[in-house]
């Protein structure tokens, strides 16, 4: 039964009969017939008084300062705050290797700005009491719509390196991708995260036999997805590395020793753990650019992709796609998925922005009736960024720098914190958009402001 409640409006209440109200005498000094001023009584709550101890006691909750790693990480509420911690705790050369990009770093700046230049369009009056962030990628479940991207020389950023990343991914129920240039072997990462969803990223070398050996090792170690990176025909001009004299392993120069004087924990960890080794070679001394230019194959063509498709029996993903045409072509050559990526802005400056390319690739794949997965990286610094990418057509996302900031800030615990921040961001953003699961996200939830 519906009840109608009539509001009580004092303005519409009948006025009392004037004959029932006795006339009050005018105060002294006010002529008869002129109205007296209204009394201005001060509410009790606004009267000043001396505070009582019982009032102050609940406010005095002084806590003992905490300087532990756990407390430091807990205070970080964003990936940017993790980055600030990482910068304070990491020598300049390895921090800049992570943080920097090619040439004027225009691409990286544009990639991050692209996520800022959107408008979310929320729906209201939806039941969002429970948010489900789980999804499926390449035929397997993932608890979150984000995985860890391949990163090279990871133990140089912090001594736990790939072990921290793979174990954090395993605990979070998401994929982890080991780079060819990773500083832990395929077998060791598999042993460190035996129940993880481990992928392997491949750079095709001029020596095809060594590439084949890596592929076979990855398969034996239980990796079910091979991610081949195709945007490194030559090394990009990473000017921060040039200015820092960045080498592998880091060289002890006057500059690095001075840098170490106020970052002793990093150097202690670096010097007291196993020297840097790689998934693909036992030792290397020189610059990053020299390594790329000497080992990676600039003659790579689609025929090599055909060879990989015949050789690798698991899922094949191509990373470094920057045009719709190339996205379609690699799928025609057998790719099960593509990663829209400009290598984090570390190769070609002024390269296409993956987030801007995403709707066009999604439209093309829909027109082609292909079920190839669309993944996206570059520029992601929050869970809201991930939600925006999913709404515009991505099936999955990958994080590189965001995870490395957490690693440098606190090792394995820092990577865990990265994923916690992103998960909380995603859940909150989806709830405010009025959606409770990823499948409910559509392009209508996002408007590109500058497109």
Image: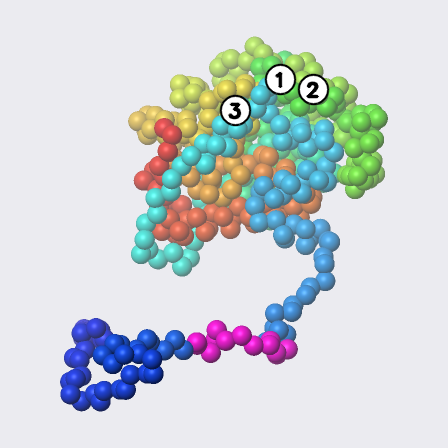
The spot of residue 7 in percent (x, y) is: 22, 73
- Residue that label 3 marks: 107
| Element marked by disc 1 | loop
Q: Residues within 10 Å of mark 3 (few under 14, many from 20)?
A: many
- Residue that label 1 marks: 237
Residue at x-position 65% and y-position 50%: 73
Quadrant in which the N terminus appears: bottom left
Q: Is residue 223 visible?
A: no
Q: Which label sits on residue 242?
A: 2
Our reading of the magenta stretch's main secondary structure is loop
Of the two numbered discs 1 and 3 on the same chain, state the one appearing first in sequence.
Answer: 3
Of the two numbered discs 1 and 2 on the same chain, state the one appearing first in sequence.
Answer: 1
The spot of residue 419 in percent (x, y) is: 57, 46
Q: CA distance from mark 3 to mark 2?
A: 18 Å
Q: Is residue 133 left or right of residue 79?
A: left
Residue at x-position 79% and y-position 42%: 265
- The question of residue 41 being in magenta is answered with no
Residue at x-position 37% and y-position 48%: 433
């Amino acid at each position: 039964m519906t009840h109608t409640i009539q509001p009580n409006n004092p303005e519409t209440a009948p006025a009392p009969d004037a004959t029932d109200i006795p006339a009050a005498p005018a105060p002294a000094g006010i002529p008869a017939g002129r109205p007296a001023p209204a009394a201005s009584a001060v509410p009790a709550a606004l009267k000043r008084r001396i505070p009582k101890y019982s009032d102050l006691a609940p406010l005095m909750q002084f806590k003992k300062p905490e300087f532990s790693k756990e407390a430091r990480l807990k205070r970080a509420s964003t990936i940017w705050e993790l980055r600030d911690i990482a910068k304070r705790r990491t020598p300049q050369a390895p921090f800049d290797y992570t943080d920097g990009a090619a040439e004027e770093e225009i691409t990286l700046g544009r990639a991050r700005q692209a996520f800022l230049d959107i408008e979310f369009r929320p729906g209201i009056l939806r039941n969002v009491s429970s948010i489900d962030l789980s999804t499926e990628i390449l035929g397997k479940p993932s608890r979150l719509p984000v995985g860890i991207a391949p990163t090279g020389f990871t133990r140089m950023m912090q001594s736990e390196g790939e072990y921290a990343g793979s174990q954090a991914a395993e605990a979070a129920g998401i994929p982890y991708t080991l780079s060819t240039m990773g500083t832990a072997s395929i077998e060791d990462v598999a042993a460190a995260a035996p129940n993880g969803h481990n992928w392997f990223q491949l750079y095709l070398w001029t020596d095809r036999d060594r590439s084949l050996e890596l592929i076979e090792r990855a398969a034996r170690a239980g990796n079910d997805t091979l991610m081949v990176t195709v945007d490194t025909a030559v090394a990009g001009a990473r000017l921060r590395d040039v200015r820092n004299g960045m080498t592998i392993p880091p060289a002890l120069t006057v500059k690095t020793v001075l840098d170490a004087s106020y970052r002793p924990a990093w150097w202690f960890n670096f010097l007291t753990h196993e020297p840097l080794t790689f998934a693909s070679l036992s030792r290397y001394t020189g610059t990053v650019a020299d390594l790329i230019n000497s080992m990676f194959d600039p003659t790579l063509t689609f025929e090599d992709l055909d060879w990989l498709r015949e050789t690798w029996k698991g899922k094949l993903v191509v990373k470094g796609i920057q045009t719709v045409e190339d996205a379609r072509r690699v799928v025609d050559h057998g790719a099960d998925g593509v990663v829209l990526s400009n290598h984090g802005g570390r190769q070609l400056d002024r390269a296409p922005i993956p987030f801007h390319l995403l709707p066009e690739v999604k439209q093309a794949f829909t027109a082609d009736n292909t079920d190839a997965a669309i993944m996206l990286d570059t520029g992601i610094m929050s869970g809201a960024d991930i939600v925006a990418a999913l709404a515009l057509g991505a099936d999955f996302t990958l994080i590189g720098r965001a995870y490395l900031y957490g690693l440098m800030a606190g090792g394995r615990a820092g990577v865990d914190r990265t994923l916690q921040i992103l998960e909380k961001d995603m859940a909150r953003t989806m709830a405010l958009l009025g959606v409770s699961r990823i499948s409910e996200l559509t392009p209508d939830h996002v408007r590109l402001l500058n497109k």
